[in-house]
Each structure stands twice: as structure tokens, then as C-alpha cells.
Amino acid sequence: MSAEGRSIAEPAKHPPPAPGTAPTPRRPPPDPAPDTRPSHPAASHPAGPAPPGADTTGPDRPAPAPGRPARTAPRARSALRAVAAFAALPYRERTDPRRVVRCWPDLTALCAATVFFWLSLTPSLVPRPWILQGVIGGITAAIGYAVGATLSGLPRAVVRWRPRAELRRAVRVRGWQAYWLLSPVVAGSLISESAQMQRRLRQLQGLPPTLTWHTVMIALTAVALCALLLLVARLVRLGARRLIRALGGWLPRPVAVGAGLALTAMTVTVGIRDVVFDRGIVDVADRIAEATNRGTKDGITRPASRYVSGGPGSLLGWQDLGFQGRNFTGTTPTRHDISAYTGRPAKDPVRVYVSSQLPRVFGDGDDGNTPFRAQARLAVRELERTGAFTRKVLAIAGTTGSGWIDSNVAQSLEYLHGGDTAIVAVQYSYLPSWVSFLVDKEKAGKATRELVDAVRARLDTLPAAGRPKLVVTGESLGAYAVEASFGSVEDLMDATDGALLLGAPNFSPLSRQLREDRDPGSPVWRPQYRNGLHVRVAQFPAVDLRRPAGGPWAAPRVVYLQNASDPIVWWSPDLLFERPEWMDEPLGPDITSEINWFPFVAFWQTTVDMAVSYGVQAPHGHRYGAGAVDGWAAVVPPDGWTEQDTRRLRTYIAGRKTPY
């Protein structure tokens, strides 16, 4: 046995003490700060006496405990042997073929998951932070794993022939070796390249190219999320298998399989819909939104104008307006504010807002529309109280899910006409727009349609020469609410004197009509409808609203502000399996040429894009800024209005701080 081997198997032997000296203790008392440097020859040479000439005057060092190595070399050799063993067999064999949940992933499925993760690194509509890139990567990797597992299992289920065990093992070993060798290198390279693509997209959309992009954290986030999703999927599979086995004791095998799969699918569906979504996500969002709806934004105070809901003499109390209603009415500019800008006499604008007043307003009605009719009647009474039907322009505004109205849209119209305006809106929900889209989307159209009908009925009782111009407006889900109030673009033009709609969602019916029936040769991100005679779509209004050059633009006019990079406009479930037209050439002015479509991947990229669509500046993403000035100047221009007036007002609206 070598000296090193004896140091592990036997206690250290100490040399005898010198004559006349006290014997050296085998275990010194504990020292709070021991000197770990060996100063006695026995500490360095436990297997024999000190070498000639060595200093033997220092204190003895305690011998290593039995079983502990005196050096780290054996540990290093053990680690190298483990690495070599893993390189020779880079996966874990499946010891029990009856095991449902694998201890080791399927190679084909893992390769597919890795490829899906790589594809998720491509840029999409708007720049995204590194954490959301990790989320997209994890979700798409889990989807890729499911696709790969399906492709891997189909041949085994269909073809009975199997190659020899030695060949299968050799192919599997070489495959895993290639995967572990190549995938980390390629993934690191692609993540680094994705950072460069994100920087180029940021520059294209007017953002500084600086970017925080954690390569390691992106990979770890994606792996952790993918592993979590796979664990859930495997637990569901395990539960289904055990359920089928239990049913097999009473039912024939085919019936047990069918019943087990059906029960599992029903359990998962009900669990996701009723437990996770309804009682989890929606309930939490509802409680947060309800608490917010009772509050008031800092700096917002009750209006002193009697022409505003919540003000003196209003039929609606200030506390009954809700959070967004108080924002809207509490920031109404006064005639002094408008005169200070225009240099001419002005009027106090009219703003009417009817909140949802849950739960009373949304109680069950005779046909489901009764509460919305009650809202509309109350809104018309408030309009009559404020003298709104004597103003030059009366605008019906569709609200988003939370009841929000863009202050840029409202104030642009009011400053344009010197305050001789009235804006009316009804709230159908206080939930965030993404939740309202899922649970309240139909209410948006019903509430706005009832308001349009009630206002139109009141206007019809007035002399034609004494009526205000009726226009409609809305942004995001508010644009959908307006579009759902009319059967077609022509119906909208017949019933109103014009419209300004911003960032209408992809499912909005009139926007879809414009895209589907657009003139040949016009891109989907800026569709030209019937030669632009009544309807025009713009991302850069100062330029786009003049297209087609020299073409007539008759009244009534409808203006759509639509950014080519707005994910709210382009999100659709069709992205899962169908390449969208907005990815075709020519691309929009702020869409990178490095964008591409892949099944499943593009859908999740665009879904995550909606969460960060406000992180850019107008006119990009879901930001429209002061573009409403150009829109209103085109739809309902005052007498004598000029291009210079439009530029001046646009600069003013863009330069001021938005009130909410």
C-alpha cells in the first residue's frame, strides 16, 4: 500500500518525543483561529519521520480524521472519472419500462424544444426585456418538447420493426454526445446575437440602443419555466394512466382508455378555466381593479365647472364616477386654459361620463341590454343639463376595459374648437383591458351601441341646421366598442359626421373589413380603402393622411391611426398556425427585416409584445401620442384652420405632461 493510501486507511503515526520533554498530545485543544499551515514534519509526512534537516520545533498538527483524504487529488480524479463516464453514456437508462414519468428526457423531444427556444430569440414587433425573452423561450421550448415527443412516439407506435439493441444504443450515445457538445455553444451564440437584433430594433423605433441582456439568466429562466411546464404535463399524464388502469378493472380496455382520457381532459379544462382563471387570475384582477376604482389619482380634484359630470349640479356624484371617470372629468381644461393657448375667447368644454356602478347597473335585465339603456338615458339627460346639444361638435367616446379615455384625444378636439365641444362616454367595466377582453368584450359593443342610439334619437328631434356634428372616437378596446356599434364602414358614415379610431384590436369588425377589402397593392399595415375617398389609415398622420396624393377626400371622413408595430392591432390566435400578412413585403416602416414567422413561436412573441407595447414612444407600439391632432383636424376642421395651426397644436399637445 502506498503512503497516500495508508494516510487514508490508518491514523497518522507521530515520532516519539525528545528525552526530557513532555509528550505531544494527539489532539490539541480547540483553537478559535488555528494556523492551517503545516509547521511540524509529522503534519506533512504522517507516514514516517521528518526528513533530515527539517525543523521539528513547531507545534504538532492534528492528523486527518479516518476516512478523509489528505489531498484533493483523489477528488479531482473522481470528478474526471465521473465526467468520462457521463461522456461515454451521456444519459440515464430507463430501468423500468413500466415507468410512466421518465427520469430522463427524450432526445428527439429535447432537440425540438431547443430549436423552438432558438427560434424564440428572433425579434418581433417591439423590443422586449431579457426576463420576457426567458418567458417566451420557456413557453415555446415546452411546446417544442411536446411536438418532438409526438414525432418521436409516432414511429414506435406505427412501426413494429426495431433495430438491434447495440445499434440503438450506439446511435443514442452519439446523439446525446452531439447534443451536449453543440447545444450550449449554439444557444450562447444565438442569445448574444439576439441582443444585437434587439438593439437594431430599438434604434429603428427611436429608442437608445443600450440594452441589458443577461445571456445566462435568459437560459436559466427558459429552462426553469420549461421544466415546470413539463412537470405539470407529466403529472397529468401519470394521473390519466392511473385513472385508465383503475377503470380497466370494471370496463373493457378500449372503453377504459376513452373514458379515462375524457375525464382527464374535462378535469384539466375545468381546473384551468374555473380554478386557475376564474377563481384565480380574474378574481385577483377584479379585487385589485375594484380597489383602484374606488380611489382617485393624486392631483385630480372635483371639477368646479357645471358642464362636467361630478361638478356642481351634476346628475352624477363625484364619488360615483369611478377612478377613470374622475380622471376624465377632473382634468377638463377650462375656457381660461384654452384661451391662454389660442389667444381667442373660448368656452368651458362639456364632458359627460356615466360609470358602470357595479353591481347595480349590471343587474339582470329583460334582454341583457336594459342596464346599458339605463346608462344611455342617464347620459342623454346629463348632456341636456350641460347644453351639449348646442355645441359645434358632439363626440361619443368608446372606453377601454377599465373605462379609460385618452386625454390626448379629448383635449385635441377641445383645443381645436375653442372648447365648443361635448364628449360623452359610458363605462361598461373597471377591469384591465386584457381581462375585459376575455370576460366583458360583448359588453363594450352593447354599452356603446345603446349610447349611440340614444344620442342619435335625441339629435333627430332637433332641426338639422341646429344640430352639432356627431363624431365617434375610441382607442384600443374603445375603438372596438365603437366599431361594434355599426354594421359596416358605410353604416358608420351614414350615422355620423366622422370618426377617429386609434389602435383598433385585430378582432374589430370594421378594421377587418378595411384590411380584407383594401385596394390592390396597398399593404395591410396601411390599407387604402376605395381610393381613400372617405377612409384613410395613418401611422405618420402628417404624411399618410395625404395618400393617395392628389386624391379627393370627401366628407364624412374616417381616420384610423394604426402603427405597423402595434401588437394590439395584429394579435390573433391565427398566428399559431398561419403566417400573417403584416410580415409580408413591404414591411412597415418600424418593422425589422429580421422578423419571421414560426408556428406557435410568433403567437407567443406577439402575446408578450402586448405587455410591453407601451414601452416605446409614439408612433410605435401601442403609442399614438399627439397624432389625434392631425386626425381631428382632418375629420372636423374648424373654419379657417390651416396646416400651420395643426403643427402648432400638435407641438403643444406632445409637449405637455399628460394629466393621467
Image (cartoon, grey):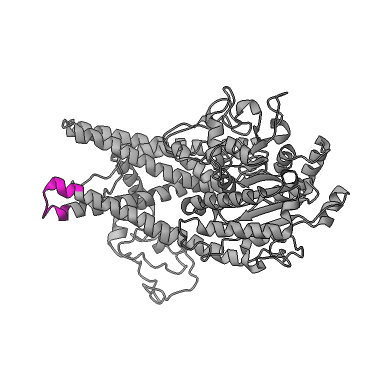
Tell me where the magenta segment starts and ends, as one range.
245-258
| Residue found farthest to the right | 343
Residue 423, x across and y down, in percent: 69, 52
In this rendering, the answer to whether 295 lies above or below 215 is below
| Viewer-closest of 117 and 284 | 284
Residue drawn at (56%, 64%), measured in percent from left and top?
Answer: 357
In the rendered image, is residue 382 in sight? Answer: yes
Which of the 4 quarters of the picture holds residue 488?
A: top right
Residue drawn at (54%, 44%), measured in percent from left and top?
Answer: 484
- Identify the image quadrant of the C terminus: bottom right
Residue 129, x across and y down, in percent: 56, 46
Which of the 4 quarters of the picture holds residue 624?
A: top right
In this rendering, the answer to whether 249 lies above or below 12 is above
Q: Is residue 355 magenta?
A: no
| Viewer-closest of 219 and 180 | 219
Taking the image as shown, residue 164 lies to the left or right of residue 147, namely left
Taking the image as shown, residue 309 lies to the left or right of residue 259, namely right
Which of the 4 quarters of the picture holds residue 17?
A: bottom left
Residue 211, x across and y down, in percent: 61, 44
| Viewer-closest of 53 and 71 | 71
In the rendered image, is residue 214 in sight? Answer: no
Taking the image as shown, residue 6 lies to the left or right of residue 272, namely left
Residue 194, x across and y down, in percent: 54, 37
| Viewer-closest of 399 and 591 | 399
Total count of labels: 0
Q: Magenta: predominant secondary structure element?
A: helix
